Each structure stands twice: as structure tokens, then as C-alpha cells.
Image: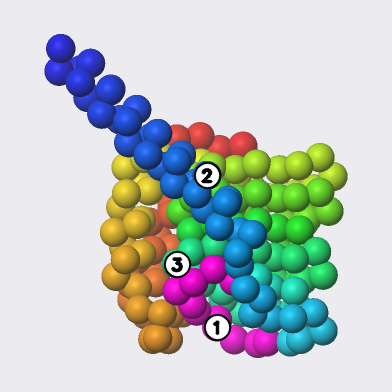
């Protein structure tokens, strides 16, 4: 009886996480443009809200919500976010607490760690993909809640704890 309750609890938690991922996808349509096409940023960009990148970014990109990499965009560096949609080019790792979607024409060279992953036909992946288990996602969310977007995120100890928590030993499968 206890095993049945435990399994039911895990399935309920998984359904909640999947529902959150769907809500994240729906919110992409309302994402403001932060870096317009033909713009260049070098360094760390850290925000609480969802953002859309249309230009060039070299450095670390962090959002507690969603990041859209537009088809005109190029990012060289790591991305940490609640959800990521890629139509442009990323050279670096993606650390995602929700869903990563690589659209037709999107390109990723690096490692992808996520709760859910989808790539459309015509995407270009030179990546390994690791799908995180529910316990890992809950741990990562707790660490993520402690991050302060106003601080120098790349040098913050909590940032390094978050990246370390994405370790492949915390995944249920890899592709």
C-alpha cells in the first residue's frame, strides 16, 4: 500500500511539473525584447522576467523565467533559465528547470540539462541532452529561489551550487 501511495505522489508531482512547463510555453508569446537584432552585449545578463534575445550575447545569460533565442540571435556562453526556446545559435551549455525547445533552424553546441526536451526537424544539435529527475528539479528550484539577480551571478557561490546540482548523476536518462 505504501509503495502505491509513493508512486501516486510522484506521478502527481510529475503532472504538476508538466503543467508548469505548458504554462511556460504559453508565456513565451508575451516575452519582451531585451537585446534587439544588430546589438552586442558582452558579460553577464541576469533578469527575473522572461526575455527575448535577437542580437549577439557573449557571456552568461540567466532568467528565473523564460529565454527565447530568436533566429537572428547568437549566444556564446551558458544559459540558465526556467524555460528556453532556441531558433538562433547557442555555443555553450543550457541549464533549464523547465522545457528546452530547439526550433527548426535552431543550433546548439554544448550540453543541455533539462526537465523536458524537444527538437523540431531541421534543428542542428552538437549536444548531449540530460533529462533531470523530479527530485533533482525540486532541489534545483530551491537553489534557484536563493539566487539574487542583482548580484554578480557568475561569481556567486549559489550560482556554482546551481550549476553543480545539474550534474549528470542527477539525471534519469541521457541521449
Which colour scheme appears in the figure? rainbow
Residue 64: numbered disc: 3
Check the picture and name the quadrant holding the N terminus: top left
**Label 2 packing within 10 angstroms: few (<14), some (14-19), many (20+):** few
Question: Of marks 1 and 3, which one's residue comes earlier in the chain?
Answer: 1
Name the side, left or right, on which 162 lies relative to 58: left
Q: Which dot, 1 or 3, sits closer to the camera?
A: 3
Q: Secondary structure at mark 1?
A: loop
Residue 44: numbered disc: 1
User: Disc 2 designates what residue?
Assistant: 22
Q: Secondary structure at mark 2?
A: helix
Q: Residue furthest top?
A: 1
- Whole-angstrom CA distance, mark 1 to mark 3, is 14 Å
- Over which residues does the magenta segment extend? 41-51
User: Residue at point 55% right, 83% down?
Assistant: 44
Question: Of marks 2 and 3, which one's residue comes earlier in the chain?
Answer: 2
User: Residue at point 32% right, 31% down?
Assistant: 12
**Label 1 packing within 10 angstroms: few (<14), some (14-19), many (20+):** some
Position of 138 relative to 59 (above/below): above
Amino acid at each position: 500500500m505504501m509503495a502505491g501511495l509513493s508512486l501516486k505522489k510522484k506521478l502527481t508531482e510529475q503532472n504538476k511539473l508538466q503543467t508548469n512547463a505548458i504554462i511556460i510555453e504559453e508565456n513565451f508569446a508575451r516575452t519582451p525584447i531585451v537585446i534587439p537584432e544588430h546589438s552586442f552585449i558582452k558579460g553577464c545578463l541576469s533578469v527575473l522576467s522572461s526575455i527575448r534575445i535577437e542580437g549577439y550575447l557573449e557571456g552568461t545569460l540567466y532568467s528565473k523565467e523564460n529565454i527565447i533565442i530568436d533566429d537572428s540571435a547568437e549566444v556564446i556562453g551558458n544559459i540558465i533559465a526556467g524555460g528556453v526556446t532556441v531558433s538562433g545559435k547557442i555555443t555553450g551549455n543550457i541549464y533549464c528547470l523547465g522545457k528546452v525547445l530547439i526550433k527548426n533552424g535552431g543550433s546548439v553546441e554544448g550540453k543541455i540539462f533539462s526537465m523536458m526536451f524537444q527538437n523540431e526537424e531541421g534543428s542542428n544539435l552538437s549536444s548531449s541532452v540530460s533529462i533531470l529527475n523530479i527530485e533533482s528539479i525540486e532541489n534545483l528550484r530551491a537553489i534557484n529561489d536563493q539566487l539574487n539577480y542583482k548580484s554578480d551571478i557568475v561569481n556567486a557561490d549559489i550560482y556554482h551550487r546551481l550549476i553543480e546540482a545539474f550534474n549528470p548523476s542527477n539525471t534519469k536518462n541521457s541521449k
